[in-house]
Amino acid sequence: MTEKKGATTNKRTKRPKPKVLVPIMPESDIESLLTTARLLAHSSPVLLLGIVPMEEGENLSEGAKPARDLRGRIQEACDRETLRAKPRVRVSYTPWADIKDVLQRMPSIELLILDWSKELSALKLSAREILTNPPCDVAVIKGPIPSKPKDILVPMRGGPHAERAIKMGMSLAAPFDAQVTTLRLHRADETEAEAEQLGFAGLEKVISEIPQLNNQTVLSDDRISSILSSAKGKDIVVMGTAAHASQMASSFGTIPDALFESCEAAVIAIKTKRALPEKVEVSSLGNRAISILVDQWFAENTFHSDEFSNLYQLAALKEERGVTISLALPTLNEEETVGTIIDIAKKNFMEDHSIIDEIVVIDSQSTDSTREIAKSKGLPVYIHQEILPQHGSRPGKGEALWKSLYVTSGDIVIWCDTDVSNFHPRFIAGLIGPLLTRTNLQFVKGFYRRPLKTGSGRLQSGKGGRVTELTARPLLNLFYPELSGIIQPLSGEYGGRREALENVTFTSGYGVETSVLIEIFEKYKLASIAQVDMIERVHNNQSLRNLSKMSFAIIQTLFARLEKRYGRTLLEDVNRTMKLIRYEEEGFSLDVEEIAERERRPINEIPEYQEKFGINAEQSEAQAVANESGHSYTPLYPTRAN
């Protein structure tokens, strides 16, 4: 089940489609264009398109030599830039039409890069045409673009282009970890309402959570002079063009025009394809800005389980980190699958490799032979209703997970569902790997394709995850858009660092995955969360009736989190009962069932837990106050006993 030490696997991967188009002409600043392409290529595949413009009346065959020369120049520059590309050259009477044709045939392309000084005139293209109906996002550059930028400035005037300019600046900075400085230009007489109308409220909230950004605010009525002054010593300045088409065909806006003419640094002016109304809604600007944070998080914090398939390396990294790891397996009548899951976990992560220090089963009063099977495998088995009995007992998986923190001891705790029929070591390694690799991560979720098992036992690919797509993800997109990049918020394979997990609220039932995810986000920010592709997961699908109950519990959980956020009651007790439709041959009837998601406060506030793990009571009280107010409290446990 494991990969041998030093073994490698050759896999043919599908070549990603290009997202950036860079037209290059005989008069272009080829060095700057290709440098920009190389800097962007780490995150967005690039297509180079050589173009030889010809005047009407000229014979296209006369373009053969210029085309050959251009291919050679592009290839030579590509070799210098270590940019893998096959230069393709077109000879054309209508180069701009050819570019738009390529963009139409390749919808994957999101960004077009043009040379301001040469290409616009060769294309007979005006600034007004670019600003009015861009075929995709367009970046116009004035070089020279440095091959290894160290400092990039992104002036923000507000409005809809700030988001795109920040994304571009971060993409250019990524290959060399360059510094990105955002410059907020604030007029002395600017009112709070005006700043809000420009979208700064939402934008500043988001960029403050991105550690790579150095955010500065400058009070000035002369924006051009302020930007030129701040640009001194910078390598590249990236900013948006005018939000709407200029009346002057040659103008990209007052400030971009001034920077093109006078700035010592290289300048990139970017125009988004997104259609812009004359009056932009303030809320839409703030919400749009969140995509900066979510897109970056998705790119940097989404892993694949194959990255951690070498268990020898994972064991070595675990030893290097000096941490202990616990695996807790929640069970309820899982006699068909639990034995195989335990065998896989023990052999791969305890016997063959010293990765997991303990495995425990947390059972919820199974009526089949689940507990007997687990005990026969040599595992400690706990019944969650019997753990911390002085604090009562509630039904539900969330209760079992909360109490599992008390009976485990690892610095890292992971949970895996036990109804999975295709269990594989990747389900465990995929959770442990990111937490060992990135010490800033506090929480990891698994995701996978979930085939739907039909009544005949056949699997329908991609049909599972109905509650995820119809309830959980839409609600998170609506109320917690920062979490919109989480592919499967309800997945049963997840885990994290004990000091984070013991500091969050658990709900007792179906809503536990939602409550833990939201609290980790609120207390530790999005950058502390990762997700891992575990390929495919096959398990027993729930009935539609149970899925309805699950959705009801998840909605309750989310509204409870919103109540804490806004400090007001949104749900009354009557809302915690659900009328379920019973389908019978003679007609329909209603069943009333209480589905109450009851909360368990963070377990580090429980005296028995504090005593077991040596948590200072005074420290814990301060933590509880912070929890109640919805704020994080750091450092967590400087007084925890050794």
Image: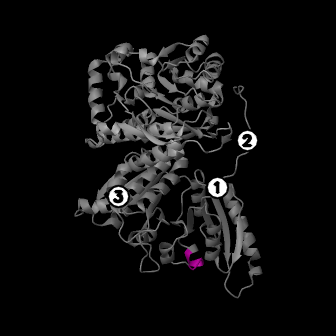
Q: What crowding class fits label 1: few (fewer than 14 Cα within 10 Å), some (14-19), or many (20 or more)?
A: some
Decide which of tag 1 and tag 3 comes sooner along the chain: 1
Q: Tag 1's secondary structure?
A: loop
Would residue 153 appear left or right of 337 to someone viewing this image?
left
Q: What crowding class fits label 2: few (fewer than 14 Cα within 10 Å), some (14-19), or many (20 or more)?
A: few
Give, as a three-letter code, the residue at label 1: Glu
Alpha carbons under labels 1 and 3: distance apart: 42 Å
Q: Tag 2's secondary structure?
A: loop
Alpha carbons under labels 2 and 1: distance apart: 27 Å
Which SS does the magenta portion mostly show? helix
Front residue of this view, candidates 230 and 238: 238
**Dividing the picture into quarters, in which one does residue 93 lie?**
bottom right
Residue 625: x percent and y percent?
A: 26, 30
Query: Farthest residue in the front direction?
Result: 586
Residue 327: x percent and y percent?
A: 53, 22
Query: Farthest residue in the bottom direction?
Result: 57
Q: What residue appears at the point 25 percent right and 42 percent down from the top-left corner?
A: 568
Q: What residue appears at the point 26 percent right and 20 percent down from the top-left corner?
A: 618
Q: Are marks 2 and 1 in contact (CB under 8 Å)?
A: no
Indicate the quadrant containing the N terminus: top left, top right, bottom left or bottom right.
Answer: top right
Which residue in the structure is indicated by mark 1? 81
The region drawn magenta spans 120-124
Q: Tag 3's secondary structure?
A: helix
Which residue in the structure is indicated by mark 2? 11
Q: What residue appears at the point 37 percent right and 28 percent down from the top-left corner?
A: 503
